[in-house]
Amino acid sequence: MKPSIRLFAPAFLFACLAAMAESADTADVNRLGYAETTFQERQIDQFEQYVSLLKDNYDVSITKPESFSVIDLRGRDDIGKNNINSNWHGVGHDMRHIIARTAIEADNEEAAFIYPRHSYFKAMLPPLRAAKDFEFELRNSRDNMEFDVTPLLTIIAEDDMSQYANADTAVIYEFDFQNKFLGRYQHCIGIYLQKAAHPALLLKIALNDKGYEKKDDYIRLMLDNIRYGDSPNKLLVYNENAIKGTPSEFNFPTHNHKCSGILPNINEETLAELNRRKTWLEAHGMEDVPKVSDEVLERLNNYYAGRKQREAETDSIVTADIPENQKVYPGHVLERRPEFPGEHPYTAQNKWIKKNLKYPSDAKKKGIQGSVIANFTVMPDGSIEDIDIERANPDLPSFKKEVVRLIKSMPKWIPGKYDGKDVCARSYAFIDFTLPPEDRAKIAAKVKASDPEVEYDARKITVNSEFPGGQEALDKWVEDNIVYTDEIIEFFKDNKDKIRNSPVVSVQCNIDRDGSIINPKLFINQGPLSVEALRLLEKMPKWIPAFINENPVRSYQNINIKFKLPEGK
């Protein structure tokens, strides 16, 4: 093996370092890989693009006050993880961070204006979604998700809203950041603006103690430099009507985003309003909207019809003149679905399966791996009947036979409940047949270059590639083998204001069929850190490759090398 390593190492390093050098040909690049001459200019361009996008697409004008300058937010670790609550899990975006697309700061460093991100599809957050955001911020500032935020909100909805950016409604509230924004701003004024058929804006003013004394002046300055126009955005008309009266969300189609997401829990009144709105828009000459509305309304109408059908089917089960233990209730009507016994049912079920699964000898001998999904009925007394194999990949009789045996031997389940009574209901089990890591490593060690290669397909992967011993073993190996050269120590000193305390070098590569690391590519050139990361990958022991059934396959892998200077360096 040693000769192949000697041949591999120069090519491994040369390919990556050549790519770094090539990127430096056209600009003065610093040791972090950024072009110094355009660092600030790029952020200014982003602010201008942000303002232009709002104006051109949503008829919202934003002007930068003369006494303010654009802040470069990229790569900073002092923007702040704020409003963290470990009992809440965000949906759609990470609510633990300040939502900022761009920001400007007063030249006297008393205040900063923070502007929100656009969504991934260049549409602003719909009004009800944005309202949830500022309620969440206030509840987290009290570390109480049940806290009544109403007394903390100043809600403004007057006949003349020209002093409030020409919005329909303005909401102003205050809270303190848990971590100072930019390391110097503790106080925050939230400003929420909403106008029909326009994007809602969730703005913030970050203030230090001196700026907080003049908070009213800064609120007025921000509002005076924002203006809603009177041209409606046609897509947002639908967005507002779709979520009206319901907390559910719905992603409406745009030019490059098809109808998807969670359908609202609509009722007949809401659906009638959507259909009425379609007629209204057509009558008012919005010719490009009916194509979108037809797609949306077809799905909404079909969803509602399907729901009515399911309700009818449920009624037929409930009223059927048959013994109760022959009525199998659908899951969507149950007060409680069937559960495996245990404090955490899903975890307990997987633990029990792992302990009691008997790997079929014929499959183990041939190195075959796979998965099986089985459905079954949980009876009112918790026993299991009517086991059906829904899918087996591969379709191996011994896999299916073992799954049936395993499910029959399960302890009694907690049955489903309907109308306060234990009833029959369907449930399922997903069972993996995965060989131990040491067996997979033995199979990979026998791979020859001349062996037929199975094409990589992420949808068919049975088990992903892994470092021998898992993530903890990888971290320990890196810690034991990393070398902090004089160049790395100097790099930390020179860039202490630009890099995190523990910077990470991410390397994208392939794990070959025999576990070798090949085709490394760096995301960002971080000078001597990148060189050391590549050296570690060249020295790293072979991985256990990914498998599709019994076949090892070449797969994609991101390997993160974390740097943390030892004490005293």
Image: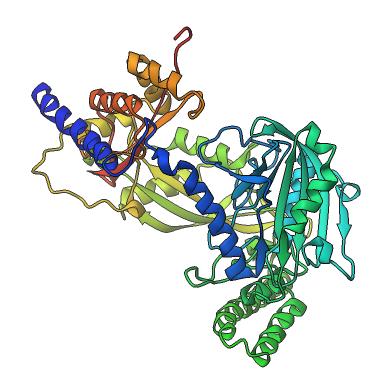
Quarter containing the N terminus? top left
Residue 482: x, y in percent? 34, 18
Q: Is residue 504 visible?
A: yes
- Pick the front one: 197 or 115: 115
Residue lying furthest bottom = 283
Above or below, 317 relative to 152: below
Q: Residue 24's image quarter?
A: top left
Above or below, 322 relative to 115: below
Q: Residue at x 81, y 61 (%)?
A: 164
Above or below, 65 relative to 245: above
Q: Residue 477's image quarter?
A: top left
Q: Residue at x 64, y 74 (%)?
A: 233
Quarter containing the C terminus? top left
Residue 339: x, y in percent? 62, 47
Q: Residue at x 72, y 60 (%)?
A: 226
- Pick the front one: 415 or 566: 566
Q: Is residue 347 left or right of residue 389?
A: right
Residue 201: x, y in percent? 70, 58
Q: Is residue 512 left or right of residue 139?
A: left
Residue 456: x, y in percent? 26, 51
